[in-house]
Image: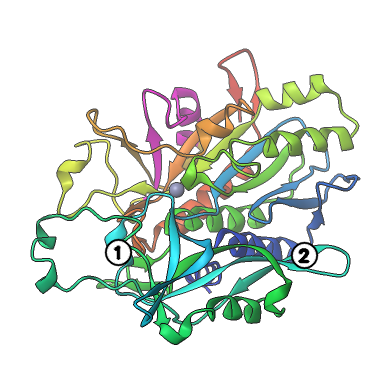
């Protein structure tokens, strides 16, 4: 199967960050890499691969080289996407005739795209056990709710622009009056437990819209969560396909909570990455001095999707520093370093892509537009290494269904793979050999 077909299968099976990470871990385990936990001692061996999760929603995988661990080659992406989280007291009754679910927005989605489409619920449930409790992933996996629009006859001005209220306009209809009290039963059934055994949960809505190829030559893909599961999947595919490293550590980092600022214990703004890097060096019997030297010779590709020129609004993007679907990996620039790319990291990547005949394009926001942030500069505040912000061009970012280019997945996988297979050594400041 092609990378793009596998991507759509991966996204369909990953309705939440928990599921995305579980699916990434399953592939890592299948490839022979060993699962570690943060609570146990690590005995790492040269030539072996490992992975560790935090909160079940972020994962870092790494391959120890057969030779010197003198640098890190990292790809980072995020596992979460904008959605709605279900509140603890989940049901609301309307005149005794309807039962709605009580939800809160997670991240900045395009509200209107969530209306009138079948939705379901997935996430994590904490179940009481004899010894304490255990987390179980759940996916109700059926069309169980819809957020209905108000008819145009009752809201004549909607097409002139409408301000949505998150408390009144966005609650999904779950059922009739009889459905009150039933939601938790569906969750318990999905978690294979009794209602009374549920101690806590993190449950989210997701659109029941399978990803698909479309266009005259099937040149586009339409799917939920392309931002950023497209880059997470590409990172995994490249990581698994890369040569076993002789020198330097290959790493794949997929962080949760990018859509809400990364400031959680498992987000890019946590100690997770730095902790793993330190523990690798401790386990290999290396000192701090060696870690600092390795960090100086390291590179990170921070991979998060980018904006393609919009067919109806080309004026929204810079005239020249703009990107199109199916035209290659996007390198993102921002003078204020919301994107981390600088001359050094761009030059390194330009040469690498050129030598491997992989197309790339350049993105900068219009100078009068602030644009969004991403992972690179946030993780950089904990682990300061050469970083490049890249992504794939897509339309409708943060819509319930986004559009991207079908050819770009291969470009990204090949570019990341070439990166993993390239060893960089450091000369004086500003001089790199590769
Ligand atoms: Zn993103």
Earlier-in-chain disc, 2 versus 1: 1
Give the secondary structure at mark 1: helix
Give the secondary structure at mark 2: strand
Indicate the quadrant where residue 18 lies. Answer: bottom right
In the rendered structure, the answer to whether residue 433 lies left or right of residue 147 reads right
Q: Nearer the viewer, mark 2 or mark 1?
A: 2
Mark 1 = which residue? Answer: 113
Label 2 packing within 10 angstroms: few (<14), some (14-19), many (20+):
some
Up-down: is 110 above or below 198? Answer: above
Quick check: is 330 in the magenta stretch? Answer: yes
Residue 21's label in the rendered image is: none
Label 1 packing within 10 angstroms: few (<14), some (14-19), many (20+):
some
Q: How is the model colour-coded?
A: rainbow
Q: Residue at x 75, y 63 (%)?
A: 29
Report if residue 41 is visible in the image: yes
What x and y, as percent, mark residue 226?
43, 59
Indicate the quadrant where residue 199 lies. Answer: bottom right
Quick check: is 19 in the magenta stretch? Answer: no
Up-down: is 52 above or below 23? Answer: above
Q: Which residue occupies the extreme bottom position in the image?
A: 178
Mark 2 = which residue? Answer: 134
What x and y, as percent, mark residue 65?
79, 42
Indicate the quadrant where residue 395 lies. Answer: bottom left
Q: Is the CB of the residue bearing disc 2 within 8 angstroms of ligand 1? A: no
Specify the segment rendered in magenta.
328-351
């Amino acid at each position: 199967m092609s990378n793009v077909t596998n991507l759509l299968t991966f996204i369909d099976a990953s309705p939440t960050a928990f599921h995305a990470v579980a699916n990434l871990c399953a592939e890592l385990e299948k490839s022979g890499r060993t699962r570690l936990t943060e609570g146990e001692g690590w005995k790492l061996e040269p030539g072996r691969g490992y992975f560790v999760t935090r909160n079940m929603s972020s994962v870092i995988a790494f391959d120890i080289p057969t030779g010197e661990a003198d640098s890190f080659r990292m790809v980072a992406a995020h596992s979460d996407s904008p959605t709605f989280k279900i509140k603890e007291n989940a049901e609301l009754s309307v005149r005794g005739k309807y039962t709605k679910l009580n939800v809160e927005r997670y991240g900045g989605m395009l509200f209107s795209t969530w209306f009138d489409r079948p939705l379901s619920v997935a996430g994590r449930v904490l179940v009481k056990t004899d010894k304490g409790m255990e987390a179980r992933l759940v996916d109700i996996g059926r069309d169980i709710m819809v957020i209905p629009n108000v008819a145009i006859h009752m809201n004549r001005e909607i097409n002139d622009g409408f301000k949505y209220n998150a408390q009144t306009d966005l609650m999904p209809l779950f059922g009739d009056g009889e459905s009150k009290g039933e939601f938790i039963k569906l969750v318990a059934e999905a978690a294979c437990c009794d209602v009374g055994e549920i101690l806590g949960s993190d449950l989210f809505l997701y659109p029941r819209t399978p990803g698909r190829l479309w266009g005259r030559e099937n040149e586009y893909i339409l799917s939920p969560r392309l931002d950023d599961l497209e880059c997470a999947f590409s990172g995994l595919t490249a990581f698994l396909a890369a040569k076993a490293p002789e020198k330097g550590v290959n790493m794949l980092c997929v962080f949760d909570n990018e859509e809400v600022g990364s400031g959680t214990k498992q987000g890019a703004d946590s100690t997770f990455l730095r902790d793993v890097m330190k523990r690798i060096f401790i386990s290999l019997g290396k000192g701090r001095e060696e870690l600092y030297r390795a960090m100086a010779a390291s590179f990170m590709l921070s991979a998060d999707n980018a904006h393609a020129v919009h067919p109806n609004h080309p004026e929204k993007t810079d005239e020249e520093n703009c990107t199109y679907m199916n035209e290659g990996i996007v390198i993102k620039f921002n003078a204020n370093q919301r994107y981390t790319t600088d001359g050094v990291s761009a030059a390194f990547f330009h040469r690498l892509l050129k030598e491997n005949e992989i197309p790339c394009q350049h993105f900068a926001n219009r100078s009068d537009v602030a644009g969004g942030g991403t992972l690179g500069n946030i993780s950089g505040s904990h682990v300061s290494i050469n970083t490049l912000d890249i992504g794939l061009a897509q339309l409708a970012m943060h819509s319930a269904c986004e559009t991207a280019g079908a050819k770009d997945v291969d470009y990204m996988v090949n570019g990341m793979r070439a990166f993993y297979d390239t060893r960089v050594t450091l000369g004086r400041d500003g001089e790199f050999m590769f």
